[in-house]
Amino acid sequence: MRHVIHDLERVKAEDDGWSAFADYTVAKAVSPAVKRTMRQLVGVGLRGAVPESELRTIEVPVTLIWGQEDPLTPFRVGERLSSTLGWPLRVIGGSDHLPHVEPPEAFVRELAVAMDEG
């Protein structure tokens, strides 16, 4: 978890559901199907794995909500997608790969804005 949460100690202290979320995530991580899928995702790194031509076929409104400190899919990837495809990019500072977990209030706020604009 320390690799995907920017301030793990703060999240643990503030989030009553953190323990259940972490336990569930770790339990799922040992599943053979989840392990296989995660190896595939990490292998391509989600950095350009889907051709731009395919992304351009998406017909529903898209807004990117990105954790600015994301070490797995760096912020520059979101910036490139936003610039190339014209998708709005909503940034959550002080958040890593799980902006819906850290900080959830900011994520909900950005999601509401995205839904209003979409």
Image (cartoon, helix red, strand yellow):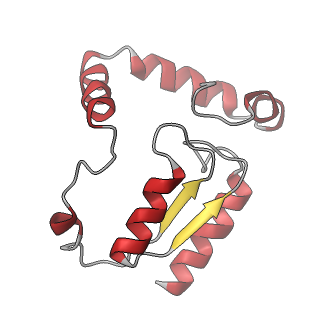
- Where does the image place residue 111, in percent across and percent down from the top left? 58, 68
Name the one closer to the observer, 55 or 22.
55
Compared across the picture, whether 30 is left or right of 117 comes to left
Name the image quarter holding residue 73.
Answer: top left
Q: Answer above or below: position of 118 versus 43.
A: below
Name the image quarter holding residue 61.
Answer: bottom left
Name the one closer to the observer, 77 or 35.
77
Q: Answer above or below: position of 84 versus 103.
A: below
Query: Disc count in the image?
Result: 0
Q: Residue at x 34, y 38 (%)?
A: 45
Q: Residue at x 24, y 78 (%)?
A: 59
Compared across the picture, whether 33 is left or right of 47 comes to left
Which quadrant: the N terminus?
top right
- Where does the image place residue 33, in percent across and percent down from the top left? 24, 23
Q: Residue at x 49, y 55 (%)?
A: 76
Q: Residue at x 50, y 46 (%)?
A: 74
Residue lying furthest bottom: 117
- Where does the image place residue 106, in percent across and percent down from the top left? 71, 60
